[in-house]
Each structure stands twice: as structure tokens, then as C-alpha cells.
Image: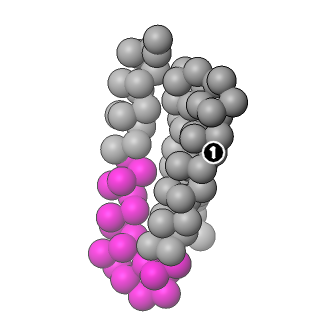
Amino acid sequence: MYNPLAFALLALEAQKVIELRLVKLAWGGAEGWDEAQQMVSEKVNALIEASGTLMMGGSTNTVISRYREHVAANTKRLTAIS
């Protein structure tokens, strides 16, 4: 069973990262291209990590918790002043 509150928080927090990434992609240029490549790479890595966790008997709560860590790191990175 999973924690519905953690799942809802992940959904809300991810929306901020989506917003920040869309802005960066819209600006285009080298930074936009780099962000697009990083985003795809992160998605593949997250799939592999989550699959491995579940195959090794981990819970959905563990996966959601780890995703929230990734989302928080992306929020911090995308809101940092360059």
C-alpha cells in the first residue's frame, strides 16, 4: 500500500519542476538543449531505479520518497541563480 499524501505531494512538487523546465526549454539555446537532454536521461534513470527497487522487494512508498528527493534536487537546481 502507498501513502496517498506522499503521492499527492509528489504530484504537486513535480508541477513546479515541470513549470521551471518548460520555461528553460522555451528560452531555447544551449541551456534549453542541455535541459532537454538531462530531462530524458533523468527519466530513464528514474525508471531503472524504481524498477530495481520494486523488483528487490521495495515498497511504493520507497519509490515515491526517492522520486520526491529527485524532484527537490531539480527544483533547487532550476531555481538557483546563475
> Measuring 34% from the left and 79% from the top, which residue is drawn there?
27
Q: Residue at x 53, y 59 (%)?
A: 44
Pick the residue in front: 12 or 59: 59
How many labels were placed on the picture? 1
x%, y% of residue 78?
A: 51, 59
29 w.r.t. 82: above or below: below
- Residue 41 screen position, x and y as percent: 55, 65
Residue that mark 1 sits on: 49
Q: Nearer the viewer, residue 27 or 49?
A: 49
Q: Residues within 10 Å of mark 1 (few under 14, many from 20)?
A: some
Q: How is the image coloured?
A: one colour
Give, as a three-letter code, the residue at label 1. Answer: Glu
Looking at this view, name the residue that lies furthest to the bottom: 29
Which residue is nearer to you in this view: 69 or 40?
Answer: 40
x, y percent for residue 10: 43, 32
Which stretch appears magenta?
16-34
Can residue 35 be seen?
no
Query: Which picture quadrant has residue 5?
Result: top left
Q: Is residue 63 magenta?
A: no
Q: Residue at x 52, y 24 (%)?
A: 60
Residue 31 in sight here: yes
At 54% from the left edge and 35% from the top edge, which residue is drawn? 68
Q: Foreground: 50 or 42? A: 50
> Which structural element holds mark 1?
helix
In what quadrant of the picture does the C terminus appear?
bottom right
Report the side of 7 relative to 82 (left or right): left
Q: Position of residue 80 (x, y in %)?
A: 57, 58
* Secondary structure that dominates the magenta span: helix
